[in-house]
Amino acid sequence: MFGRQFIRIPRLARGLATQSGPITGVPAALHLKTGQSFHGRSFGAPKSVFGETVFSTSITSYTESMTDPSYRGQILVFTTPLIGNYGVPLNKAPFDSQDVGVVLESLNIQCTAVVVGDVAEKFSHYTAVESLASWCQRHDVPAITGVDTRAITRLLRDQGTTLGRIAVGSDAALPVPAAHEFWDPSTENLVDQVSTKTPYQLNAGGSIKIAVLDFGAKANIMRSLVRRDAAVTVLPWNYDFNAVRDQYDGLFLTNGPGDPAHCMEAALNLRRTLQEWDKPVFGICMGHQIIGMAAGLDAYRMTFGNRGHNQPVLALASSGSIKAGRVYVTSQNHQYALKLDDPFPEGWEPFFINCNDSSVEGIKSTAESGKKVWGVQFHPESAGGPLDTIEMFTDFVLECKAHKLQTLAANKISGTATIEPLTEPLAAPQIAVQA
Ligand SMILES: NC(=O)CC[C@H](N)C(=O)O
């Protein structure tokens, strides 16, 4: 009914559109450990890889998702059928006090491979410098198009996250490998592969000092702290923060890939911190799981992880900008969760719960505990949005400032320090959602 003339691209858009890198036409397949195969064409690196097959329901931000270190070891299936239409930006920013050296979430593609229904062969965006295909090829990441991602998603939604293989070229015609041949990324400490090896600083002149334990941080977490005038010191995931904690006004624990059980060392260090130190602590995703483990909760592997930018969570308690009884739409990427123990460990309470599957989405220290500790399973800073909970960063920074002021005032009374004036109120965060 709709002839070609009705979907013609206007002249201007045609001018902006750029040819993609080559879609090779080489055969490729997704093989699942459960025996199913999906056949399509390769548009990425000409090699075969194993990984954990997961799906994301995000409609935008394929570039942010693919550079999120939490996707390490995973074959990422996008449920949105057309991927690649706005290309890939130049992933470099000045490494200075205002930014963290990258435009996306990290410098490299972090997922093991991508699976899309229909890769865009032309792209158009004012920041784009290359196509999704050429980006994958340059980063040696296999990618497959022309498969029924709806069927794959329905399968994963029924049987849960499944180990898989992207087979490219002649491998695509081979039968599904034997079960024991599939590589299981959860057996490895992936955090150790993506965490910084040496400490580094951002925005050294900031008005409060935050230590960040890096489990595989998304760059937008650092930006969200720096934009609120925090001086940020990024430490390796297993750094013993207790040795340096007196220098800081707050502690932040980032997201990160894989099974949190591999990071028990960090949870035990944190347990001591929480017992002996009363400054604010905030954790996101893996960081939230580590806080929970330090508090005595168990983490478990979910059959169906949550990945996408449309996960609704219900606040069970009020704190700062968060109001009990409200539902917030959040960005998520996780396979593990904290158990909803009843009763919760003393001094702790559930903060958020997922509206779809009732999993724990956040915990916090109780008012009676005298502590200021929060962990959330979702990503308040999500670069692809939504930003419903972004003000949790402001809450954290303000709590760090308030604690600093109280300590200085107490020391002044005891004659051991002078009071530094608080800097002017925090400017409204300037968060630009990247295309
Ligand atoms: N984004 C994250 O930090 C993920 C946490 C953990 N790797 C999980 O899958 O649950």
Image: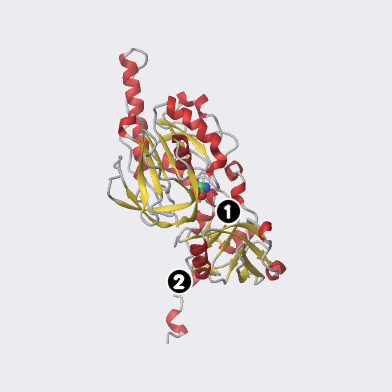
Q: Dot 1 surroundings within 10 Å: few (below 14), some, or many (20 or more)?
A: many
x and y, in percent, of residue 163 in the image? 60, 58
Mark 2 vs 1, N-terminal side: 2
Tag 1's secondary structure? Answer: loop
Residue at the extreme front: 342
Residue at image x 60%, y 66%?
144
Place of residue 45 in the rendered image (x, y in percent of width and height, measured from the top left): 65, 61
Give residue 308's mark.
Answer: none
Can residue 70 be seen by looking at this rendering? Answer: yes
Mark 2: secondary structure: helix
Q: Residue at label 2?
A: 12
Which quadrant of the figure contains the C terminus?
A: bottom left
- Whether residue 222 is visible, yes or no, is no
Q: In the image shown, does 159 or 369 lie closer to the viewer?
A: 159
Name the residue that disc number 1 marks.
109
Image coordinates for residue 319, horizontal then vertical, percent: 30, 40
